[in-house]
Amino acid sequence: MNELTIEESQKLNELTVEQQDLVNLIREFVDKEVLPIASDLDHRDEFPEELVEAMKEMGLFGITIPEEYGGLGLDLFTYILVVKELSRGWISLSGVINTHFMAAWMIMTYGSEEQKRTYLPRMATGESRSAYSMTEAHAGSDVQAIHTRARREGDEFVLNGQKMWVTNGLRADMVMILAVTDPDAEPRHRGMTAFIVEKTPDVGEQPGLVVPPQLKKLGYKGVESTELVFDGFRVPASSVLGGEGMIGKGFKQFMAAVELGRVNVGARAVGLATCALEQAIKYAKERDTFGKPISKHQAIQLKIARMATNLRAAELLVLDAARLKSTGARADLEAGMAKLFATEVAMENAAEAMRIHGGYGYSQEYMVERLYRDAPLLVLGEGTNEIQHLVIASRLLD
């Protein structure tokens, strides 16, 4: 684990003027445009079209894409700050850009120059939207167990298999796909390849691909989670991420993106936990019992103190992991710790906010019921927290 000096620890919390201005812009957007309508959109399970258009105008779809490809050219740490603020409003909103961001990162990191020129400019504006697909019905945390096959036929690969829990799976016009190209490879991960798969957006059926109706979920409404069923879907050999020389390298490429995704999920958890704390404090000051606001009762104060302390610790873990990952260094230990702790804090803060609201917390009149339904996704996404324990222990014992 990295050891920080006192000076380095102090710098951890320092933001540049550009970063602070962007954070303030997103915070104002969330307060004015997102929070007033997020719960209504959630209850209707409605895609936030107008909010997404606003994010496009702010350049958020290309926030880390280099300026030479039309993006803002900002670093991972800045992106994490933005994700945290968006998630304070609604984690579904950050979900719209998260898989897009991971796909862009993979192309920037592993793609050929031709792939960068082809995809990144359209991704930067949000004209092209991407999904990221690795999970299958029988292969979640055990990625090496995937069955989706890409069989070579001349200058093409033919995809067959079924992917699950694909965020933006319907609306995206491209998907990063992990598939088996050599089923006899030992170890198995050496037979897996990453593909940039182009498809027609907003179409449930097209030659070789079916996108079934979106999955019904407890929370995380508004943004679609779908299956992708490939049955003879053809892609050119040029769609191999990084070119044909990268055939068999897909597992490592996807695992690097998952490491990034865990920092991402940690930031979303910090945003949700922040909202839960803010709503708890607001309600505690307004609600009177026994002749005084419940914020004056010691039991409520103890809850709020614990929520705020855990939130601060979670935030520091996430920022530490984001700083390290943005340098290009290995950060699986830090990312695992950040994801594990921050998501558990999100769960606890959502539950405590509901308890502080009492009966009203169970009502759709207040947004804490939405936070309570959204929080479990973060515990499960990008590797369950049980898997995070194993990742952390493995690195420490290595």
Image: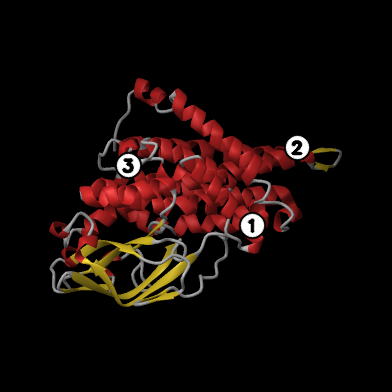
Q: Residues within 10 Å of mark 2 (few under 14, many from 20)?
A: few
Compared across the picture, whether 156 is left or right of 200 comes to: left
Against 6, residue 132 (above or below) is: below
Nearest the viewer among 183 and 247 is 247
Residue located at (55% from left, 45% from top) = 54
Residue located at (19% from left, 65% from top) = 237
Residue receiving disc 3: 69
Residue kind at label 3, given as amino acid type: Tyr
Element class at badge 1: helix
Which is nearer the N-term, disc 3 or disc 1? 1
Label 3 vs label 1, nearer the camera: 3
Q: Residue 295 location in percent, x, y?
A: 73, 37
Distance between the Cα atoms at labels 3 and 1? 33 Å
Distance between the Cα atoms at labels 3 and 2? 49 Å
Residue receiving disc 2: 285
Which is nearer the N-term, disc 3 or disc 2? 3
Residue 360 picture quarter:
bottom right
Where the N terminus falls, by quadrant? top left
Q: Are the two marked residues, 3 and 1, in contact with CB atoms closer than 8 angstroms?
A: no
Q: Are the two marked residues, 3 and 2, in contact with CB atoms closer than 8 angstroms?
A: no
Q: Residue 5 location in percent, x, y?
A: 33, 24
Q: Residue furthest top?
A: 7
Element class at badge 3: helix
Distance between the Cα atoms at labels 1 and 2? 27 Å
Residue kind at label 1, given as amino acid type: Leu
Residue 164 picture quarter:
bottom left
